[in-house]
Each structure stands twice: as structure tokens, then as C-alpha cells.
Image: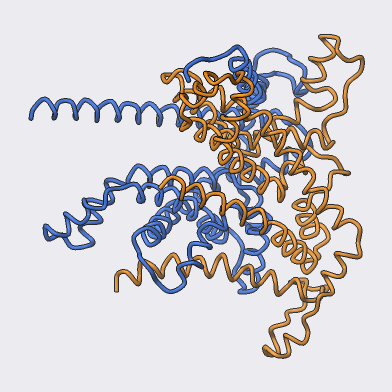
Amino acid sequence: MNRLSPFNVVSLTLGFVFLYVPMLILVIYSFNASKLVTVWAGFSTKWYGELLSNEAFLDAAWVTLRVAVISSTIATVLGTMAAYVLVRGGRFFGRTLFSGMIYAPLVMPEVITGLSLLLLFIGIGLDRGVLTIVLAHTTFSMCFVSVVVSSRLMTFDRSLEEAALDLGASPVDSFRLVTLPIIAPAVISGWLLAFTLSLDDLVIASFTSGPSATTLPMKIWSSVRLGVSPEINALSTIMIGLVTIGVITASLSTKHAALRAKRDEQAAARAT
Amino acid sequence: MRRATLISVPYIWLLALFLIPFLVVFKISLSDIALAIPPYTPTMRDGFWNMLSQLDFENFVFLTEDDLYWKAYLSSLQIALISTVLTLIVGYPMAYAMARAPDQWRPTLLMLVILPFWTSFLIRVYAWVGILSNEGFLNQFLLWIGVIGEPLTILNTNTAVYIGIVYTYLPFMILPIYSALDRLDGSLIEAAEDLGCSRLKAFWLVTIPLSKNGIIAGCFLVFIPALGEFVIPSLLGGSSTLMIGKVLFEEFFSNRDWPVASAVAVILLLILIVPIVLFQRNEQRQAEAET
């Protein structure tokens, strides 16, 4: 099917213009000297300076980063366990309920998840703050991790694990030495997904945080409700830049790894 | 012993932080509002049977009596449906073109579709505020090329909400359709053309039916989250844009009527069960077809 018609070229071009122009405008106007966002008044980096000297933003960024690192790490452990149980666990009591609870949060509206967790935290008298946001983020992101990891577990050759067990490895050793290295890329992408979801979340954090903890999306939200602000444009540019570098690095390194694996395979084929 | 630990840790976590919170919402939706903190009558205090006798459907009756709520449900359904169709119209040609692109371009094209997904959702919605406002870039551009004589009001209308939903959920539509089209055997289309189908007819009779599962999956992946959307209608929509996610948020944070907010959540969940079940059935059928 490798024939691009003029229609295909036009739809791809327009589609990518639609996807990227809004972000491009944000980036360009973050360097605008004027406070009026639609009038260009020359190049300036003053909004970056103001952003970096704004303590409220820095505090919020620090809270967000802490929440994201802790919650995505716990979510990766729990999500990998859940994926292993679902794919390899066989039958156990309440398996249907378990898989339902793994898949339901993926499609649950955030307002419902947020509301229900808040009512629970108030019901048991837990003070709202960083801890409650971490609990909330861990819960929904572990489900995403589990879906990513279980799709890798399903396609993996089980005889490798059985061989390790036959050769005398304990189940723990076989998991550590055989299974984990093979599913590692999926576990890492699960962590990254959980990390991004946590960094990005506004609604669930608004419900589950208390006055002591404000995350970056909550801070952004309270400033953009009043309209466009040049400081937020600067912040957006930093975030878009970091993500772009991250995604390009990740895709180049997987490409590199794939090429190396191919070369190794060819070398091995020649050697035999 | 180890297996039991492996199962029980994530199981108990989800029971405690996913299932039980829902039961709490359900219970509070049946309680009465009180001017206190928490602002509802805690019905559990005097024993289980006493609690049961205090529960009632007053909040649900209230929802049916006040126009606002059922209008919000209907308008959420309508906005989600229209946006899903628009996303399909924008997304299908892109996925189709990607599937026909030369092999060496595909990883780059895929990365370009996925990249916006990794950037902040809030920022991507916010980007449109500066574009759609009366003095925004879109109006400036249209005035400059002379298509319109005076600025169009787009921000704070439902049109802006549609644009926001299409923009943020486009990758969810493109990816499943692309993966369905990518697996499609090109010789089937050639066969149809050899047998006398025009290009358009072959597309309609072969390509579309064979990418049906991708289309269905993509539509649900846009429709389900769009239905409960909060950020897009609050930032881009106007005061007349009614969406249930926004109503719930305001009921909770502005009116502080927790029992009614809970009842709104329970009904939203009931409305969502149908598309979610249909979606899972579609996924299962696809998984079975592959094996």
C-alpha cells in the first residue's frame, strides 16, 4: 500500500498543522516582550526570569515532582504484580472482580474518581495533602502500568521461565533473572506513563489535596482561568521542550537497541 | 504463600482505594445535606439498620425535578457524540495516509502522533484560549486574509469545546484505526479493483469494513472520556455550555452540596456503563479474532 495520493499528503499535512501549530504559537509567544499575548513587541526572556523567581510556582513544581516520582514508583511495583497475577496467576477467588478493578479506572471520568477518593479520605479522617494525592495517583496509574506490562507478558515465550525452573532456579530467581529482564522495557514505559499521568493530573489532585499541597497543574489552572498569561506560556514551553527531548531520546535509543540486536543476531548466525 | 501475597497486595489496594470509595459515594448520594463539615448527615453512626432507615432517594428525585441536571446529561451526550464524529472525520484520513506512507516514514509519523499525548493535557487545552479569543490568532488571521469583516465569537461557545475535544483526543482515534489499517492486506484492495470496483468503491466496500474494529475502538476511546470531561468545557466553553463533569465539580466545590454531587456521579456512572460494556465486548471480539 505504499502509494501516497495527493489527498493523503494533504490530510497528513493539515492534521499535523492542526496538532502542532497551537503549541508552536505558545512557544513563540513565550518570548514576547509584551504582556498582551496577541501583540508582538520584540524578543525577550523576561517571563522565564519571572517564572523562575516565582516561589509559588517553584513550590508547586517541587510538590508535583515528589508526588509523581513516589506514586509512579509504587504504581509500577503494584501494577507489575497485578499484571503478573492476571496473566500467570491462573484461577483464584474473585479474579473477575480483580480484572474489572484493573480496567475500570482506565475509562472512569476523573471527576468521579476524585470525588469518591475525597469522600473516602474524609470518611476515615485522613488529612489531605501530599500523602492523599500520592494514594490517589498510585491507584489510577497502577492500572495503566498493569495494562502495559500484561500485554508484554502475554506475548512472551513461557518456555524460557520453565527452562529456568527445570534447571533448578527458584520461582523468585526465575522471575528476577529471566522474566524481569525480558519485561523490563514494558515496566520502564509503564513507569514513564504513570509519571506523566501524575504530572499532568488536575482534577483528581484538586479533589484529593488539601490547603497544604498545591500541584503545578492546580497552580496553572488558577492562573489560566483568568485568561492567557505570559508566565504560563513560558512554563508551557519548558514542559513541551522537556517532553520533546525525552520522547526523541527514547525513540532514538530504542531504534539503536533494535539495530544492535539485529547486528548481534547476524553475527551469531555467521558464527554458527 | 508467595502467590497469595502477590495476589493480595494489589487486590487489597484496589478494594480499599477504588471499590470502597464508590460505595461511599453511593451511600452519601442517599444521605441528607447538613450545614456542617462534612456537609452531610453521617448515617452510619447509630448502627446499620438505623442507617438503612435513614437512606432515601431524595437527591435523585431532586435531580429529576431540576431542569439543570437532565439538560446537562443530555447536552454532555450530545457534545461527546458530535465531537466523536468530528474526531473520526479528522482522524480517519490521517490514519489512512499513515498506513499508506512508505515504511521508513512510519516510525516518525507515529512519534508525531504520540508526542502531543505526552505533553500536558491542560497546556494543550490552554493553547486554544489565545487562538480562539476575539483578539486571538484565528480572528486576526481571518481578518487579515479578508474572509470575515469582524471578529467571530468562538471562545466560550460549544464550537470551542468541540475544537478542544477533537484536538486533545485525536491521538486516541488515530492509533487504533492506524493499527487496524496497518494489518490490512493490500492485495484485497487490488483484487477488488481488478474485479471492477472503482477506487472509491473499493475503499467503501473493503477498507472501511476491514478497519471497523479500529473505528469502533477509536470512537469509544474518545466518547467515554469526553462525556465526563471537565477541563475543556470549563476553559473553552461558556456559561451556557452544560456538561455533567463541570456541573459535578461546581456542585461540589461551589455549592458544597455533597449528597447531590454524589447523586450526579452515580447517574453519570450508570450512563457510562453501557458504552464501557460495548467497548469491552468489541475489544474481546477483536482479541478472539486474532487468536
Residue A114 location, x and y as percent? Answer: 65, 58
The part of the image, by quadrant, that contains residue A14 is top right
Q: Which chain is in orange here?
A: B
Q: Residue furthest top?
A: B145
Q: Residue furthest front?
A: B195
Q: Is residue A173 left or right of residue A145?
A: left
Residue A149 location, x and y as percent? Answer: 40, 50
Q: Is residue A88 left or right of residue A24?
A: left
Foreground pick, B234 / B98: B98
| Residue at x 63%, y 44% (from the top left corner) | A217
The part of the image, by quadrant, that contains residue A59 is top right
Foreground pick, B123 / B220: B220
Q: Is residue B161 left or right of residue B182?
A: right
Residue A146 vs A185, above or below: the answer is below
Colour option used: by chain
Q: Which chain is in blue here?
A: A
Residue A213 location, x and y as percent? Answer: 61, 54
| Residue at x 83%, y 22% (from the top left corner) | B135
Residue B237 vs B269, above or below: the answer is above
Q: Is residue A210 visible?
A: no
Q: Residue furthest left?
A: A272
| Residue at x 35%, y 64% (from the top left corner) | A89
